[in-house]
Image (tube, grey):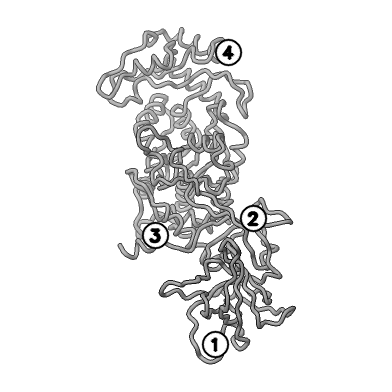
């Protein structure tokens, strides 16, 4: 799917956005363009750390950064913030590229890495030392934390704070040369240990890490901190608007300080609320724990909120764009109902997927008055509202599979499916009436004996009688066996991030988040490509999984047909 298609509902330029009503980020960009700031340029960036897979929170940032660039005729870079070699891997780099492309992001030839700038960053660090604005500190991490103070207690100056420029340069160069062990020294900015903003109390700019880097190898043993790297990378790349989540509000003062102190080109940092979703964790640390401890089947487990997991589940990128548009941008944190995401997925799939028949909990129907050995086919549309999807031939025979739940021995009121003596319509086929239900010794239903009305071919009433119930079916002689994975929320608790005292988010794991069932599918699904999503009529949307083999297909449920969010909206 192209970037243009995915961002097609966004206004094309500032003036159009103003008429439609815009969020505060776009309003600020429009103001900057009107004032001539940045010479009317709009240049954003998406800066992931290659230490894990992207998740729904990143989708919001991808849609924003690439969307804003497209709307205002600008550019968006993909920049990997690879400043921590102990946690980074090329596996993550490759996965991030794939996910961003899947969401429609096009960075063209502008793929950058923080490691591209290591030499320049080091030079800027030395310049801060020469300006008397940075020093090498011998305090340990715990001591630095203690000296920093609290919100109610000012910090204390390090004994190393007033070292001479010459001594600091010497120590910093020896840090780079590898003379010191990890944690023996750090480089800190010299700002204000009494600042009300704790971030400005002489923050660390460089630390020692004797670790192999995925791109620079062993060329470096000191690595810059994110806050130092980020603003300088933005400046080097000519970024105009650096869009960050709210946790970086306090860091903006340091962002500005570094660039102003060095006298460099200065982008504008803007912060927006990060995504929080019910029944979900979006902490990379927690997602890594789920994978490493085997609570899920990998990063692309369809229960995971990772983009690769959502893709494997059959979620279309267009649905994520719709979701991000609907939740919008805010300056305050809030939690979004998971049902809204499901609504967006369902809305897109309803208009863009073929309909087929599948039976997930099969029970056999024998049509006693249908001739043995006889078969026929019915032409059925792939989409009842879009003829362009075409039709397929669905075989019919004496023995069928239907859903076990479509029969009740003692039906409740307003039950319009099969029951003893009840008549229903087989979708696009015939009317059938149940004559007998057969049970095994354990009392489990094994077979339904029925008769059909030959005059009702195509599901049409021959005499005007009304049949309220319509059920789906699959010919037993032609059915394709398959394994269907039915997914529920990975976490049973609405907010697994806020568990009672003594519990962790793992205590909220839903033991019923995955259930597998042996299903029977109509033969039209035999050649469905892996990754394609279809609607199983009356059951939901399902995606063919990569675990499928010639011996049997595997399908993941993407989302059900029930739309609780739309009902809430209607009743609001």
Rendering coords of residue 180 (x, y %): 54, 11
Counting residues from the N terminus, which is met first, the one under dot 4 or under dot 2?
Answer: 4
Q: Which residue is mark 2?
A: 554
Q: Farthest front residue?
A: 441
Rendering coords of residue 247 (x, y %): 38, 35
Q: Which residue is mark 4?
A: 177
When asked about the image quadrant of residue 259, the answer is top left
The one of 282 and 128 positioned closer to us in this rendering: 282
Q: Farthest left residue?
A: 152
Counting residues from the N terminus, which is met first, the one under dot 3 or under dot 4?
Answer: 4
**SS at mark 1?**
loop
Mark 2 and mark 3: span between their CA atoms? Answer: 28 Å
Counting residues from the N terminus, which is met first, the one under dot 4 or under dot 1?
Answer: 4
Mark 4 and mark 2: span between their CA atoms? Answer: 55 Å
Nearer to us: label 3 or label 4: 3
Q: Is residue 209 left or right of residue 272?
A: right
Query: Which residue is located at x 54 percent, y 73 percent?
Result: 471
Mark 3 and mark 1: span between their CA atoms? Answer: 36 Å
Numbered label attached to residue 565: 3
Rendering coords of residue 242 (x, y %): 43, 39
Q: Quadrant of the N terminus?
A: bottom right
Mark 1 and mark 2: span between their CA atoms? Answer: 37 Å
Q: Are the two marked residues, 4 and 2, in contact with CB atoms closer than 8 angstroms? A: no
Numbered label attached to residue 540: none
Q: Are the two marked residues, 3 and 1, in contact with CB atoms closer than 8 angstroms? A: no
**SS at mark 4?**
helix
**SS at mark 3?**
helix
Q: Which residue is mark 1?
A: 461
Nearer to us: label 1 or label 2: 1
Counting residues from the N terminus, which is met first, the one under dot 1 or under dot 2?
Answer: 1
């Amino acid at each position: 799917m192209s970037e243009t298609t995915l961002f097609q509902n966004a206004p094309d330029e500032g003036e159009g956005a103003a008429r439609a009503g815009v969020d505060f980020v776009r309003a600020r960009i429009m103001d900057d363009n009107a004032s001539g700031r940045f010479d009317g340029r709009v240049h954003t960036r998406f800066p992931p750390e290659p230490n894990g897979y992207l998740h729904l929170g990143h989708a919001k940032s991808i849609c924003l950064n690439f969307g804003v660039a497209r709307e205002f005729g600008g550019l968006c870079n993909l920049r990997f913030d690879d400043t921590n070699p102990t946690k980074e891997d090329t596996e993550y780099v490759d996965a991030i590229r794939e996910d961003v492309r899947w969401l429609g992001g096009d960075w063209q030839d502008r793929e950058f890495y923080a490691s591209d700038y290591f030499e320049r960053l080091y030079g800027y660090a030395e310049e801060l030392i020469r300006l008397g604005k940075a020093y090498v500190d011998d305090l340990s991490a715990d001591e630095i934390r203690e000296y920093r103070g609290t919100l109610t207690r000012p910090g204390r100056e390090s004994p190393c704070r007033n070292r001479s420029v010459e001594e600091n340069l010497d120590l910093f160069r020896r840090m780079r040369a590898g003379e010191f062990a990890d944690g023996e020294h750090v480089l800190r900015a010299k700002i204000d240990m009494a600042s009300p903003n704790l971030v400005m109390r002489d923050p660390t700019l460089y630390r020692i890490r004797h670790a192999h880097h995925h791109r620079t190898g062993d060329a470096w043993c000191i690595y810059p901190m994110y806050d130092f790297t980020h603003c300088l990378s933005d400046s080097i790349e000519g970024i105009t608007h650096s869009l960050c989540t709210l946790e970086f509000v306090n860091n903006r003062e340091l962002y500005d300080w570094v660039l102003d102190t060095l006298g460099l080109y200065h982008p504008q940092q803007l912060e927006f609320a990060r995504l929080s979703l019910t029944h979900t964790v979006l902490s990379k640390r927690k997602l890594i724990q789920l994978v490493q401890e085997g609570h899920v089947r990998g990063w692309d487990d369809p229960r995971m909120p990772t983009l690769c997991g959502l893709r494997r589940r059959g979620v279309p990128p267009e649905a994520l764009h719709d979701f991000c548009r609907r939740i919008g941008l805010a300056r305050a944190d809030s939690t979004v109902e998971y049902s809204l995401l499901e609504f967006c997925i369902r809305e897109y799939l309803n208009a863009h997927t073929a309909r087929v028949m599948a039976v997930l909990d099969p029970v056999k129907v024998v049509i006693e008055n249908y001739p043995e050995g006889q078969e026929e086919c019915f032409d059925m549309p792939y989409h009842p509202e879009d003829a362009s999807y075409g039709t397929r031939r669905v075989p019919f025979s004496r023995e069928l599979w239907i859903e076990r739940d479509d029969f009740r021995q003692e039906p409740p009121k307003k039950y319009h499916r099969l029951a003893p003596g009840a008549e229903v319509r087989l979708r696009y086929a015939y009317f059938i009436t149940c004559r007998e239900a057969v049970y095994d010794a354990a009392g489990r239903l094994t077979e339904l004996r029925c008769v059909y009305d030959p005059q009702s071919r195509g599901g049409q009433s021959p005499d005007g009688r009304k049949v309220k119930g319509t059920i789906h079916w699959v010919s037993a002689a032609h059915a394709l066996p398959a394994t269907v994975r039915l997914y529920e929320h990975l976490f049973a608790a609405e907010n697994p991030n806020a568990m009672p005292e003594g519990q962790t988010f793992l205590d909220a794991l839903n033991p019923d988040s995955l259930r597998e069932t042996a299903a029977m599918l109509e033969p039209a699904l035999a050649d469905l490509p892996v990754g394609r999503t279809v609607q199983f009529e009356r059951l939901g949307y399902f995606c063919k999984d990569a675990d499928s083999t010639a011996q049997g297909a595997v399908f993941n449920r993407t989302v059900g047909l029930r739309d609780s969010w739309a009902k809430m909206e209607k009743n609001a």
